Amino acid sequence: MTDATETEHHIEIAEETEIRGDDAAVTVRRIRTPKGERLEVRAGDDVLRADALGLESLSWQDLDVFEAFLGHEYDLADRSESEADDDVDCEFTLSNEYADIVVRSVASPDGDRLIIEAPKKHFSIRVDAEGLEGLAAQDTEIFSEFLETPHGPGGHAH
């Protein structure tokens, strides 16, 4: 799913965007590695790389999962946001043999957001820079925990 041993010189950056918040700035990239496409989330020295299946498993998580990453209440979980006012800055697809993911960087009236959508599963998650900063600091094993429900919270493929 992810490989922390991949070296920088074997990576091609295909897309890059930045998600900014009041206290955080996170670089998000679609990269090509010898082992396939990955989404790279980089906040300072913290870097997390995930493939499409890992991101699909993230798409059905409750926003409260970010509270564990951050060590405090994640305010975004309390807000309801409308996508109607979003301006898409960057959009790309990440795919492998198991999953297809659409990633969008948007500027909304409430600030920059990264939307990770699993269209076939009908799940998506919106995360701000603070949440992405917390995600970047995680070990890739977090996706194994997310995949304990491999078809999402309902337990069945759509």
Image: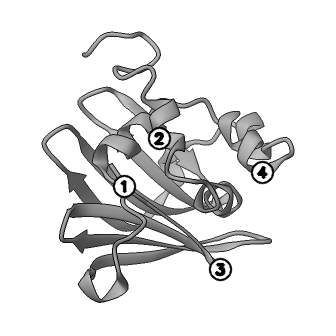
Q: Residue at x 84, y 47 (%)?
A: 71
Q: Which residue is mark 3?
A: 44
Q: In the structure shown, which secondary structural element does the residue marked by tag 3 occupy?
A: loop
Q: Earlier in the sequence, mark 2 or mark 4?
A: 4
Q: Which residue is mark 1?
A: 2
Measure how far apart labels 4 and 3 are at the Cα level: 15 Å
Query: Label 4 is placed on what type of residue?
Result: Leu
Query: Label 2 is placed on what type of residue?
Result: Phe
Q: Which residue is mark 2?
A: 143
Q: In the structure shown, which secondary structural element does the residue marked by tag 2 occupy?
A: helix
Q: Residue at x 77, y 35 (%)?
A: 78
Q: Nearer the viewer, residue 53 or 88?
A: 53
Q: Earlier in the sequence, mark 1 or mark 4?
A: 1
Quarter of the view holding residue 135: bottom right
Measure how far apart labels 3 and 1 are at the Cα level: 20 Å
Quarter of the view holding residue 44: bottom right
Where residue 87 appears, as percent x and y from the top left, is 46, 63
Query: Label 3 is placed on what type of residue?
Result: Gly
Label 1 crowd (10 A; few <14 / some 14-19 / many >=20): many
Measure how far apart labels 1 and 4 are at the Cα level: 22 Å
Q: Earlier in the sequence, mark 2 or mark 3?
A: 3
Measure how far apart labels 1 and 2 are at the Cα level: 9 Å
Measure how far apart labels 2 and 4 are at the Cα level: 17 Å
Residue 17 in the figure: left or right of residue 25: left
